[in-house]
Amino acid sequence: MLLPAFVYLILIAGFAAYIYRTQLDEQDAYKWLICVGIFTAAVTLNRNVWLLYAAVIGVGWYIVPKDPEKRIFYYLTLFCILPRLSYEVPFPGVNYLIVMEYPFILSLALLLPLFWQFRKAGVPHSKFDLLIAVYLVYVTYREFSFDDSFTYWARLVLVNFFSVWVPYYVIANAPGDLKRYMVALLYGGIYLTVAANVEWALTWQIFANITQYVNDIVFSRLSTAYYFRGLGLRISSSWMNPISFGVFAAGTCYLLLMLQKLGKSRSMLTFALAGLALSATLFTDSRGALLTMIIALGVQAYFYSPTPVWKNTYKLCFVVAVLLVAMNFQTFMDLDPSGTFQYRADLLVYSKDAFFANPIWGDVNFRDNYTLSANMTQGQGIVDIVNHYLNVALRYGAVGLFLYLLIWTSIIARMISRVSQLQSLGDHRYHAGSILVSLMVGVAIVIYTVSLVGYLPEYIFMLMGLASAYLKSTGDRPKTKATAMAAHTDPPVFTGRRFN
């Protein structure tokens, strides 16, 4: 029994719920606390992982409201409050039938009913829905070359369907207040960043202890090891990886700084919480994570003024800054005593042989390439592909990379265009869009320097779902400033058959 961990986490969750209710005026704060309390008790007071699965399904059935907007809100608030807790479900005749994980069960319990409800109602697809569906089908098909057994195919399809496609599709196609959805991300953000600061201060990996406590959970020893560097213990909270958690913590800090644009009032406590989120980011000892917030703030500055003079000046300064960085790149390399910049540069060089061996379709076994493994294997005995775009190129070839880049560039370009149009018309809906696109640009750039571990895959497609929903909800943008000011902005209501 991990009673101390349970007590610590409940106290932190109680503090977070108090903040949500009193400072953010969120009516669901204490019901969220009940859900967190049930989930935490299930994994700290009992070793059987099936109790957690039953708890999640019970919460989804009896506590979370049936309203689509509410269910999405609760999914966003709860999606990363626990480690993934991977469990290989046994089955006669095979090693295991499927890998069950916390985000898998949460999606199954909260979002799957909405998914079938939306499909039955005939909710129209957007081009982004189709593009992401094509990408997921393609990468799933390419993964079949790793293992041609039926069980591997089945578990891969199920995991991609429940963990990625269902959350994206439901978020992208459901009605609701986009500002409140982004506030929902702060629920887990504030809770985990406060808990992470406690972990750092006590040098006690609370979530790592939970992972090791539950029976039959598959976890990497590297993810639960104690690493000290820079400011001390590198914290990872429930994400089990400091860099990926740092990206989320940086996003939390950014959202807190932008809280007023999300329709919430700011106070000194808001800035104190932002400071805690920033310290959590720093304690991950990840420069890339901090870069997420810096880039997001930089992009947000683009929407400081709607005037063409400001935007053109900003673009000019951006180009000049990029040129200066490119001209002095070696200086930045020399300022990096740990060699992380050099490792990333070498990775691009030694990956060429693996890429050109299968340039079109890629190779899921690319790590077996002799040139890559001989030159880039680290002390842990692995080749760490700390560049997600490179990983996609090596694993899924030029086709996969093209599809993935097309998703990012088309969504971001469309978002920037839509937000700029709404801003020029004085439509206040541009605030939520500017915050979301700024965060997306930050993540899109940073994953050039990190691999997708922890909750980053779900987090990325969650942001894409929010962006797609934003583009759909603002598709009726007014043509003039006068009509923009008088526009009806209440979110549509889902009746079960169609949107009204």
Image (spheres, rainbow, N blue to C red):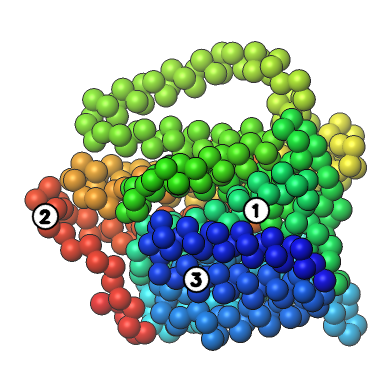
Distance in Å between CA atoms under marks 3 and 2: 39 Å
For the C terminus, give its image quadrant. bottom left
Q: Could you tell me if residue 398 is visible in this image?
A: no
Residue positioned 78% across, 57% down in the render? 208
The residue lying at 78 percent from left, 50 percent from top is 204
Q: Secondary structure at mark 2?
A: helix
Q: CA distance from mark 1 to mark 2?
A: 46 Å
Q: Quadrant of residue 477?
A: bottom left
Q: Which numbered dot is residue 84?
A: none
Question: Could you say which disc has been placed on residue 483 in the image?
Answer: 2
Q: Give the percent coordinates (x, y) of residue 237.
A: 69, 52
The reply, left or right, for residue 77 in relation to residue 120 is: right
Q: Which mark is residue 195?
A: 1
66 horizontally vs 239: left or right? left
Disc nearer the start of the sequence (3/2) = 3
Task: Judge by depth and name the residue closer to the eye, 410 or 60.
Answer: 60
Labels 3, 2: front one: 3
Q: Residues within 10 Å of mark 1 (few under 14, many from 20)?
A: many
Question: Disc 3 marks which residue?
Answer: 30
Nearer the N terminus, badge 3 or badge 1? 3
